[in-house]
């Protein structure tokens, strides 16, 4: 995953999170936004008495498709081709970016409008196009705010969740002119007024653009149909107005049939926006003679996904439908914010997806599997039942196998040695019990991470096992292992 | 009913009163309680930190130590979940081919204290007396992995003299997370601060949970803040009587 140069060189998670924790405004915004979506989701999920069955069905469909991914991708290719589209296969980000750049060049255009898409952010498409003299215009309102602010998204569904109204107003006033229609001088920070300014700014763009780039939420193999689910309608403008449509989609987004799709169209809106049904669902199959784009290109993106698929524990990550429910319930995301995760995928899903796509060699990527208390709230809400804590622990093992942390390795070894023999454990407990009066208020070095905000527990005079032996007159410990 | 007490290394070393409370409570309810001293640790810290491949000897020790009891009772939701969910996984990839069978034999006997009381013994009123206001933090692993549901609060509501106060945001994590508290101290402390604020806001005298690890973290923070709220394990409240108050 060569992304998003914007994300390179970031500090490891704990350091980035420290800054966010210290930003009271950010924490307030995040708390308010995540708790609002969280309760909306809980309410609409609670309405369905077959939610668990739906969830199981979603998981089963994805597992089946992933097991036979080669088969369904070929079917999809055949169907898209038969419907007049062109299919391109991209092994990695560079190849995908090259394909898209060449396709845009071939149209003779220098501008593209974009439908909100995680895959194109993952591969850093906007930056790659920019380097070739092609300008990509984000049309999703929140993505527009991020783009105009020269910023990074911090939430999958609400990329500008870290911005408040007055900041958005300032960004519009300052930046819109450089990108097209300027913001009106009397712009206020009322949501309605801000939305209107964005609408005016984007309208001309929609009407003049020759090329659109999108992702897709789903691809139906049996008919070669792509599906985009959205709230604003801007996506639909991009998908229907320009002459050429290029969709860059991860290979895991395929589902076999329309019947399978029906499951996800129930799971996704309830999980992501907390709505029974999202306002706009756009579907297209190749090209049609009198409607929509004349040329349709589908770029199927691997970029590490087949490697993830090969990992028995990690492959469940590919079931993800990017609903962001896991972000909205995550207590760590709520405090650390999206930027701390250092990729376009923040929150629990980012903590498991990014290290699998990029590997765990950088300090940041190696810190991501530890960005969780393993509280399990994410697993509980995930509409495709990804056991995120299980994958996190699995990735921690990879980090440890890759060398891990020296002091931690030594500490774990020592603990393992003590626990291997209850007689040793009893001796350690007695030493701790004797030292109880000298428990310090603050520890030096790494221990300060505990004592900066918490008192240390004071060891008791007598451990449980010594108490039991004294009370019940049994031997304290079995014979010590030699 | 012969019960093997799985004390857990944290309770053994730091919170012996919790273990003593479990013994007193279960004996009061007519169980024969044994503490097999061969036990040490379930391996949770190793497993959750990424050192899961090192715990095979601990998994073997657990299965051997607790083989043959009618029930194995623990007063830690996270250690109970470690045995139930992860010992089979660890055994499946162990060098010793007999380990999966040994683990499979012992796992169904493992119960969290409140599960054992409500589901096995069939009691919801354990005859306790604790004349104080209490708020209960459900603890993530007790809640989501052991699925204790409302068992702990049902037990608490039946304690004579006890007034239970609802904890706002009860299901949110306290921010302990084992080594998370050390690896991500800022986020951990921020989560803890919110939990403590909610607990103190209830006006309860006691913050109760079924896991001493969370209470160590919460109690350590409240102690530092001199909040005046004390922490107590569920077992200690349930064992409390007029004669032996907690
Ligand atoms: S991991 Fe699950 S909850 Fe999180 S974004 Fe993906 S599908 Fe949604």
Image (tube, coloured by chain):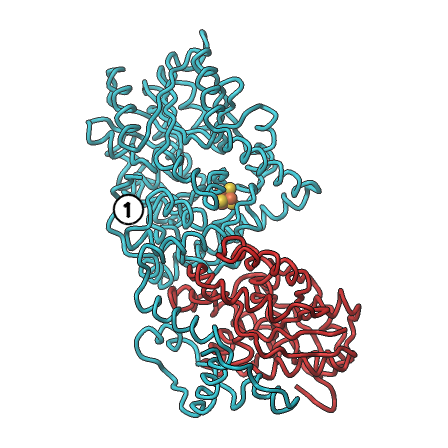
Chain colours: A cyan, B red
Q: Residue at x 44, y 7 (%)?
A: A289
Is label 1's Cβ within 8 Å of ligand 1? no
Direction from residue A5 to residue A39 in the image, left or right: right
Does B6 appear above or below A303?
below
Residue nearest the observer in this picture, B125 or A142: B125
Residue nearest the observer in this picture, B96 or A450: B96
Q: For the residue labelled by badge 1, is the local secondary structure a helix, a strand or a loop?
A: helix
Q: Quadrant of residue A149?
A: top left
Direction from residue A402 to residue B18 in the image, left or right: right
Residue position marked by numbered label 1 in the rendering: A7
Direction from residue A41 to residue A94 in the image, left or right: left
Q: Residue at x 54, y 34 (%)?
A: A62
Counting from the top left corner in percent of width and height, residue A178 is at 23, 34
Counting from the top left corner in percent of width and height, residue A208 is at 32, 19
Direction from residue B141 to residue B46 in the image, left or right: left
Residue nearest the observer in this picture, B211 or B204: B211
Quarter of the image that includes the C terminus of chain A:
bottom left
Counting from the top left corner in percent of width and height, residue B25 is at 72, 80
Counting from the top left corner in percent of width and height, residue B203 is at 60, 77
Quarter of the image that includes the N terminus of chain A:
top left
Question: Label 1 marks which chain's residue?
Answer: A
Does A401 appear above or below B123?
above
Characterize the local packing of mark 1: few (<14), some (14-19) or many (20 or more) Cα atoms within 10 angstroms: some
Q: Quadrant of residue B241?
A: bottom right
Q: Residue at x 26, y 44 (%)?
A: A6
């Amino acid at each position: 995953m060569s992304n998003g140069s914007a994300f390179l060189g970031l500090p490891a998670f704990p350091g980035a999170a420290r800054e966010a924790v210290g930003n009271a405004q950010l924490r307030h915004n995040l708390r308010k936004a995540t708790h609002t979506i969280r309760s909306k989701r809980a309410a609409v999920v609670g309405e369905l008495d077959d939610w668990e069955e739906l969830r199981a069905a979603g998981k089963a469909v994805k597992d089946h498709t992933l097991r036979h991914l080669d088969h369904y991708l070929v079917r999809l290719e055949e169907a898209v081709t038969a419907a007049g589209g062109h299919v391109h296969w991209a092994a990695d980000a560079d190849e995908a970016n090259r394909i898209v750049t060449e396709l845009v060049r071939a149209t003779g255009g220098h501008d593209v409008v974009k439908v909100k898409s995680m895959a194109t952010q993952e591969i850093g498409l906007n930056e790659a196009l920019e380097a070739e003299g092609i300008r990509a215009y984000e049309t999703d309102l929140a993505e527009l705010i991020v783009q105009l602010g020269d910023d990074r998204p911090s939430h999958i569904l609400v990329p500008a969740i870290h911005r408040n109204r007055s900041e958005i107003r300032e960004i519009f006033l300052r930046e819109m002119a450089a990108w097209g229609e300027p913001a009106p001088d009397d712009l206020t920070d009322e949501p309605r007024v801000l939305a209107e300014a964005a609408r005016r700014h984007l309208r001309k763009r929609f009407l003049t653009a020759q090329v659109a780039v999108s992702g897709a939420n789903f691809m139906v193999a049996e008919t070669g149909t792509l599906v985009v689910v959205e709230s604003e309608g801007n996506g639909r403008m991009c998908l229907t107005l320009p002459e050429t449509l290029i969709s860059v989609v991860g290979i895991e987004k395929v589902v076999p049939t329309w019947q399978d799709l029906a499951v996800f169209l129930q799971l996704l809106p309830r999980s992501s926006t907390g709505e029974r049904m999202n306002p706009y669902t756009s579907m297209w199959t190749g090209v049609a003679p009198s409607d929509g784009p004349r040329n349709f290109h589908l770029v199927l993106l691997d970029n590490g996904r087949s490697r993830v698929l090969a990992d028995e524990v990690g492959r469940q990550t590919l079931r993800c439908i990017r609903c962001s429910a896991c972000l909205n319930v995550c207590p760590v995301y709520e405090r650390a914010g999206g930027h701390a995760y250092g990729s376009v995928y923040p929150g629990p899903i980012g903590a498991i997806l990014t290290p699998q796509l990029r590997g765990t060699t950088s300090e940041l990527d190696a810190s991501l599997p530890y960005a969780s208390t393993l509280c399990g709230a994410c697993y509980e809400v995930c509409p495709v039942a990804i056991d995120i804590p299980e994958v996190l622990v699995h990735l921690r093992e990879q980090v440890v196998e890759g060398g891990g942390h020296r002091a931690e390795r030594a500490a774990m070894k020592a603990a393992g040695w003590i626990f291997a023999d209850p007689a040793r454990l009893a001796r350690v407990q007695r030493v701790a019990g004797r030292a109880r009066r000298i428990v310090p208020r603050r520890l030096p070095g790494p221990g300060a991470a505990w004592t900066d905000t918490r008192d240390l527990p004071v060891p008791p005079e007598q451990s449980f096992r010594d108490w039991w032996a004294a009370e019940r007159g049994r031997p304290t410990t079995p014979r010590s292992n030699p | 009913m012969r019960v093997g007490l799985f004390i857990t290394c944290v309770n053994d070393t730091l919170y012996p009163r919790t273990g003593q409370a479990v013994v007193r409570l279960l004996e009061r309810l007519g169980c024969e309680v044994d503490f097999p001293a061969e036990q040490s640790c379930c391996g949770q810290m190793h497993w959750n930190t990424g050192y899961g491949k090192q715990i095979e000897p601990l998994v073997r020790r657990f299965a051997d130590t607790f083989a043959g009891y009618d029930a194995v009772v623990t007063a830690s939701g996270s250690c109970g979940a470690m045995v139930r969910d992860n010992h089979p996984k660890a055994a499946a990839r162990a060098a010793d081919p007999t380990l999966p069978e040994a683990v499979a034999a012992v796992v169904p006997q493992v119960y969290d204290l409140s599960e054992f009381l409500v589901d096995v013994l069939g009691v919801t009123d354990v005859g306790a007396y604790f004349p104080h206001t209490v708020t209960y933090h459900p603890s993530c692993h007790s809640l989501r992995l052991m699925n204790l549901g409302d068992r702990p609060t049902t037990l608490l509501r039946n304690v004579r003299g006890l007034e239970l106060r609802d904890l706002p945001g009860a299901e949110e994590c306290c921010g302990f997370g084992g080594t998370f508290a050390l690896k991500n101290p800022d986020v951990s402390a921020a989560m803890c601060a919110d939990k403590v604020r909610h607990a103190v806001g209830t006006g309860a005298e006691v913050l109760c949970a079924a896991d001493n690890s969370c209470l160590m973290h919460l109690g350590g923070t409240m102690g530092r803040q001199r909040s005046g709220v004390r922490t107590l394990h569920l077992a200690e409240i349930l064992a409390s009587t007029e004669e032996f108050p907690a």
